[in-house]
Image (cartoon, rainbow, N blue to C red):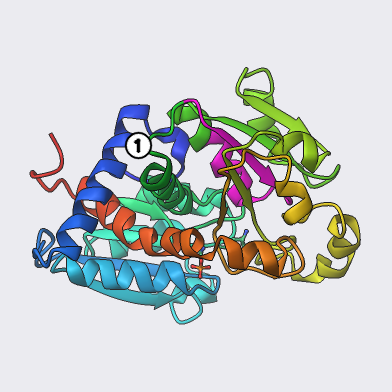
Amino acid sequence: MEHLLKLSDLTKEELLSILETGHDLKKKLKSGIETPYLKGKTLGMIFQKASTRTRVSFEVGMNQLGGHPLYLSASDLQMGRGESIEDTAQVLSRYLDAIMIRTFDQADVETLAEYGTVPIINGLTDLYHPCQILADLMTIQEVKGSLEGLKFAFVGDGNNMANSLIVGSLLVGASIAVASPKGYRPNDDLLERYIDHPGFLLTEDPYEAVKDADVVFTDVWASMGDEAEAEIRKKVFQNIYQVNHDLLAVADSQVMVQHCLPAHKEEEISTEVFEQHAAYIFEEAENRLHVQKAVLVHLMGVPAYVS
Ligand code: CP
Ligand code: NVA
């Protein structure tokens, strides 16, 4: 594995191996075992959007691995004044050992990888959020034991989370049902690729999607970049696309709820459900740290983890 641009670039074995490394690094951290595998390495982190979890977990993770994280706000880089991604990639590759980027256009992440010579990690684009889905799958393994054969449901906007969740779920052998309103469905190319997959269901009805689900996911109705549409979206989504007590009544009795955060309580998730499932939602946030450390050691070829 050369980069982490999107989950569809990974094989099932690669994905499961990252999760295994994540569990191992988590165990080592909790036992006080040091893991200075990236001593002397620097990770550049370009942010064109806000972040709490992604920034802090990559920064802390890189420190725990003995390396150095470098926060680069896109607006402070010459990129913000029009320097091309192509040139930025070639220059930064000469200083850094890996680059994480959070931006709008997936094409910018792909261009960074094409022109750079170091591993590139997608820290969220409008299209995908691979690191988040890796953390979610790791959390589900902890709670449910395995992923194969589980029934996942996503309720809400067919955004970056929904897109990466479709790819990740089907890759690990879980089924995924997505309930989104017309006009807010997941990415068209993905739908074309997966619409006939026996493990995939697309519906407008959250109750159909959540029926018997083992894990229910949701995310904000208006993502970063969609702020101008927030009021229109609220009208489309409200009263229907909310994970609440009534909706979860049709799920499996042991249903687990995941939310990538930040959450808008009483919009996509009721406060009651959020609070009932908060322990695993915050574990999911913690697992960003462990699984991203796994991504870093895999991409940077740490022999203990990469065969
Ligand atoms: N879930 C997630 O990516 O959070 P941040 O936007 O805070 O990084
Ligand atoms: N879909 C959300 C996820 C935030 C982590 C967004 O893109 O804003």
Q: Which residue is mark 1?
A: 15
At x 62%, y 17%, the residue is 198
Quadrant in the rendering for residue 286: bottom left
Q: How many marks?
A: 1
176 is higher (above) or lower (below) than 133: above
Kindly state the secondary structure of the residue where label 1 is placed: helix
Quadrant in the rendering for residue 211: top right
Q: Residue furthest bottom?
A: 76
| Residue sitting nearer the eye, 273 or 122 | 273
Image-based side of 149 in relation to 163, left or right: left
| Residue sitting nearer the eye, 128 or 269 | 269
Q: Residue furthest front?
A: 253
Can residue 2 be seen by looking at this rendering? Answer: no
At x 73%, y 60%, the residue is 268
Q: Quadrant of the C terminus?
A: top left
- Residue interval drawn in magenta: 149-167
Can residue 142 be seen by looking at this rendering? Answer: yes
Residue 135 x %, y % = 41, 52
Residue 49 covered by magenta stretch: no
Image-based side of 156 in relation to 138, left or right: right
Query: Are there few (<14), some (14-19), or many (20+) residues within 10 Å of tag 1?
Result: many
Q: Residue flagged by tag 1: what amino acid is it?
A: Leu
Residue 245 x %, y % = 74, 55
Q: Quadrant of the N terminus?
A: top left
Residue 10 x %, y % = 38, 33
Residue 161 covered by magenta stretch: yes
| Residue sitting nearer the eye, 185 or 47 | 185
